[in-house]
Image (cartoon, helix red, strand yellow):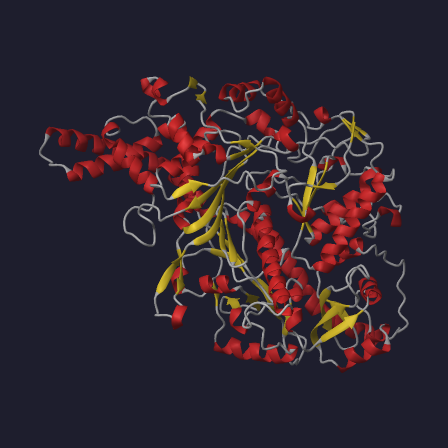
């Protein structure tokens, strides 16, 4: 049996402890999450000395190296593919040969480290993150840390903010992610990333993944749909923007009021934005990943759903204007992010497997699905609303070809938006007007240039429009971000605006929901009733033949022939469906939906909530009507924004498959004897509810917080006389700690924590992992031996018993969430 590793105290600054033993917190660094097409790396894999890897890790560790060769960064994968490179040369995405060569050369090198600072964590933590980050930069620029480290012969760049990202909230460093481990010169920066990422203060996200949400132009009252959201980095970015815009609007209202201007009835909303974001994904397991990501932010304005994006349901809200007429109206989205599944050939720098696995068929195979998802997005979009379509592919078949189809079949209701003047420091190329279609059989500049036997394998929608049509659509308004332009991955972004209802607009007209499918059927019926070569076209032909034969006179020779063909096609389809049945059943089993629905509290629960309100002294401004629960025997109460409540509380939306929504506010627990209130405040929501509390708040200093972190469960007598008396006078149960001090006065000034008042002691209602992260952020070193002046074993036993029940609940919640994510 191997020697048990000793636990190292967690410190943000490694200079506080010179031990070479890896801490448990470091060994569990959060996986970096990016857009829905990225591979989530596992940071727990240990590499062999000879550069071998374990698990699915495709990287060689360059830990401790000061001279890093990016060509040797990936294990057993040569970042080169002749067929891949020749394909894009023929495609003509870049005319200049030298520039093309430069792009492919950079595509074979690892990505720099990039991250965003969370804007919803409160000014105290946000200031702390920025101050520590700038401290790192200042130390490195003065000669420490980075001076001897080179990548491909060039000295690494200091961490710096992106020039194009607002308010310097997104940063980058040229150091690849894997180069941080065990490299003494980089350990301080590594510790900064580990601790703040685990705490949710920063989000590790690829630079190009940050671009699409910026062009949504989010406002705090908007309803937003992220159609293919997992793993959730873009979702959290949008959610942060929703809250940030709400805060800015409040500041403007306060400013106008103080200057004597504005409407006298205009009052700032002191809690949450009215809008919400619906984060959807087709895969249930990835939905739980979404829940984990969004829970770190702690927002009441989120709904996580599990639907096929191309079939996402139209939602309804009850009419409330003028008192309401008892009717309902469809909810059309103000903003939609349509980051569709794609071949991911722009991700070679983070997913080196692309070099080995890339084929011609990847883009062609996803083309129709991408059209269907984007079409559904247009149908769900509000008139005047904006949809951002994006992929991490450079292939026009997945990009401009899809946009072309959307615009052509929209009947003038959808148009591209020129955003070239926005974020001018973001370097991008315009969209393409022309391209060719290539598969393993050859290069086909036009649909007609294909051999006759291929014309029903490749859809006509793959090819570009005529030059005149491309100019009228303004395909140049699309944005192409290539890796060599600003040291990123490859990405495509198009901003679309809905100027009128779509043909056969869902929620307003009867008829087919998918106008593109309908139009395609109408225009190609006569040419596809007799020839079929693939599964997809067979099904389409069958539908078209059926529609045609029922409309014509059945006594004609043509009809008889078509009916005979129809029978053959039906038999063929049925046989193929029978062959696929076991696979479908297995897929359905994986995707089975088990979650209980969210509901508004019943009468019995409302009585309990009245007790909760009195216990914590909730002010009249607190929105008691915005609370939700889940299931009949739920022990949790959730806080929802107005939009979330409107969607969840409407019976007409019961078909919506909700994985999770809103913000967990209260958690009930029993077993500690008679208490006035059995509900504790969740740490996830304490920052939001604190302004509404008039009772059970104790102000402490940063030193008091450090003492709590060190002792874990201090006695009342461990505090000064004032705090000790407040704790003694308080009834047992949950209370809130608020740290005193002006902004930046101490490391924790203004922060709030949920805590438990026991019989003789108190402790934080915070998970052990969070506490360890805070210790690292605040530079706290555990004392070798913590001696307690009170050696009364009876009192110590009481203290342990009363905290065991509550602490075990927090641990169990963390385990339950982890199990859902892992499964």
* Whether residue 19 can be seen here: yes
Q: Where is 384 relative to 676, above or below?
A: above
Q: Is residue 489 above or below residue 96?
A: below
Image location of residue 683, percent across then percent down: 67, 64
Residue at 48 percent of width and 78 percent of height: 603
Residue 663: x percent and y percent? 58, 62
Q: Quadrant of residue 547?
A: top left
Query: How many dots with numbers?
Result: 0
Where residue 204 appears, as percent x and y from the top left, is 67, 44
Name the side, left or right, on which 707 lies relative to 45.
Answer: right
Farthest residue to the front: give it.
260
Residue sitting farthest toward the bottom: 729
**Is residue 17 at least partly visible in the picture?**
no
Q: Please identify the residue farthest to the left as the structure is shown.
A: 555
Q: Is residue 141 left or right of residue 202?
A: right
Relative to the observer, which residue lies in front, 776 or 796? 776
Which residue is drawn at the image coordinates 49% and 65% (left, top)? 645
- Judge whether 759 appears above or below 814 on screen: below
* Residue 441 place in picture, x, y as percent: 42, 18
Q: Nearer the viewer, residue 803 or 124?
A: 124
């Amino acid at each position: 049996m191997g020697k048990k590793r000793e636990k190292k105290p967690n410190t943000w600054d490694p200079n506080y402890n010179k031990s070479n033993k890896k801490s448990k917190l470091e060994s569990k660094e959060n996986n970096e999450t990016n857009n829905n097409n990225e591979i989530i790396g596992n940071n727990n894999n240990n590499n062999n000395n000879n550069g071998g890897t374990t698990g699915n890790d495709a990287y060689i560790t360059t830990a401790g190296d000061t001279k890093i060769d990016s060509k040797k960064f990936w294990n057993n994968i040569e970042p080169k593919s002749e067929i891949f490179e020749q394909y894009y040369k023929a495609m003509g995405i870049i005319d200049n040969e030298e520039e093309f060569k430069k792009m492919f050369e950079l595509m074979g090198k690892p990505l720099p480290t990039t991250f965003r600072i969370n804007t919803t964590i409160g000014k105290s933590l946000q200031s702390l993150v920025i101050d520590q980050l700038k401290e790192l930069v200042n130390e490195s620029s003065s000669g420490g840390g980075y001076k001897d480290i080179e990548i491909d012969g060039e000295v690494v760049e200091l961490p710096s903010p992106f020039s194009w990202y607002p308010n310097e909230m997104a940063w980058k460093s040229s150091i690849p992610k894997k180069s941080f481990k065990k490299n003494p010169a980089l350990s301080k920066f590594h510790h900064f990333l580990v601790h703040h990422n685990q705490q949710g203060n920063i989000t590790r996200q690829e630079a190009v993944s940050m671009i699409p949400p910026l062009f949504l132009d989010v406002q705090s009252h908007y309803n937003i749909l992220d159609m293919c959201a997992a793993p959730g980095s873009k979702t959290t970015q949008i959610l942060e923007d929703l809250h940030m815009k709400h805060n800015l609007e409040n500041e403007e209202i306060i400013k106008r009021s103080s200057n004597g201007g504005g409407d006298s009835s205009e009052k700032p909303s002191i809690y949450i934005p009215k809008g919400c974001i619906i984060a959807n994904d087709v895969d249930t397991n990835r939905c739980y990943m979404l829940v984990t990501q969004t829970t770190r932010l702690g927002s009441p304005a989120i709904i996580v759903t599990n639907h096929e994006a191309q079939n996402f349901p139209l939602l309804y809200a009850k009419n409330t204007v003028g008192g309401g007429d008892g009717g309902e109206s469809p909810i059309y989205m103000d903003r939609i992010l349509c980051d569709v599944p794609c071949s991911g050939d722009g991700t070679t720098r983070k997913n080196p497997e692309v070099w080995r696995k890339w084929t011609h068929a990847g883009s062609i195979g996803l083309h129709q699905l991408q059209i269907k998802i984007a079409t559904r997005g247009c149908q769900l979009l509000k008139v005047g609303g904006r949809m951002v379509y994006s992929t991490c592919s450079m292939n026009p078949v997945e990009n401009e070809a899809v946009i072309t189809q959307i615009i052509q079949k929209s009947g003038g209701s959808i148009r591209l938006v020129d955003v070239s003047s926005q974020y001018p420091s973001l370097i991008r190329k315009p969209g393409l007007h022309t391209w060719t279609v290539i598969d393993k059989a050859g290069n086909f500049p036009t649909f007609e240039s294909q051999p006759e036997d291929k014309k029903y394998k490749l859809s006509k929608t793959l090819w570009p429009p005529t030059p005149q049509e491309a100019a009228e659509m303004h395909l140049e308004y699309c944005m192409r971000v290539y890796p060599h332009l600003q040291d990123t991955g490859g990405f495509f972004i198009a901003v679309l605006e809905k100027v009128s209802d779509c043909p056969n607009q869902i929620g307003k007209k009867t008829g087919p929901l998918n106008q593109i499918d309908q139009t395609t059927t109408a225009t190609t019926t006569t040419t596809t009733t007799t020839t079929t070569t693939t599964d997809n076209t067979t099904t389409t032909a069958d539908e078209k033949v059926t529609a045609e034969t029922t409309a014509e006179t059945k006594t004609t020779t043509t009809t008889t022939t078509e009916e005979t063909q129809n029978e053959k096609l039906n038999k063929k389809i049925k046989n193929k469906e029978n062959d696929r049945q076991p696979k479908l059943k297995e897929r359905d089993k994986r995707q089975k939906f088990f979650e209980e629905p969210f509901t508004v509290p019943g009468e019995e629960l409302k009585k309990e909530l009245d007790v909760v309100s009195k216990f914590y002294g909730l002010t009249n401004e607190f929105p008691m009507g915005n609370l939700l629960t889940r299931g009949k025997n739920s022990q949790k109460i959730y806080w929802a924004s107005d939009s979330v409540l409107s969607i969840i509380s409407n019976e007409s939306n019961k078909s919506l498959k909700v994985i999770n929504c809103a913000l967990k506010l209260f958690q009930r627990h029993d077993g500690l004897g008679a208490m006035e209130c059995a509900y504790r405040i969740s740490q996830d929501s304490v920052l939001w509810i604190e302004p509404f509390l008039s009772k059970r708040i104790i102000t402490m200093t940063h030193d008091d917080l450090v003492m709590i972190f060190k002792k874990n469960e201090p006695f009342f007598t461990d505090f000064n006389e004032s705090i000790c008396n407040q704790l003694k006078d308080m009834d047992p149960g949950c209370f809130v700690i608020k740290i005193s001090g002006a902004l930046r006065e101490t490391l924790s000034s203004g922060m709030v924590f949920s805590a438990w008042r026991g019989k003789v002691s108190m402790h934080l209602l915070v998970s052990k992992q969070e506490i360890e992260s805070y210790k690292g952020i605040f530079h706290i070193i555990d004392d070798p031996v913590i001696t307690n002046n009170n050696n009364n074993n009876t009192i110590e036993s009481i203290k342990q018993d009363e905290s065991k029940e509550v602490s075990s609940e927090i641990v169990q919640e963390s385990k339950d969430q982890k199990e859902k994510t892992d499964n």
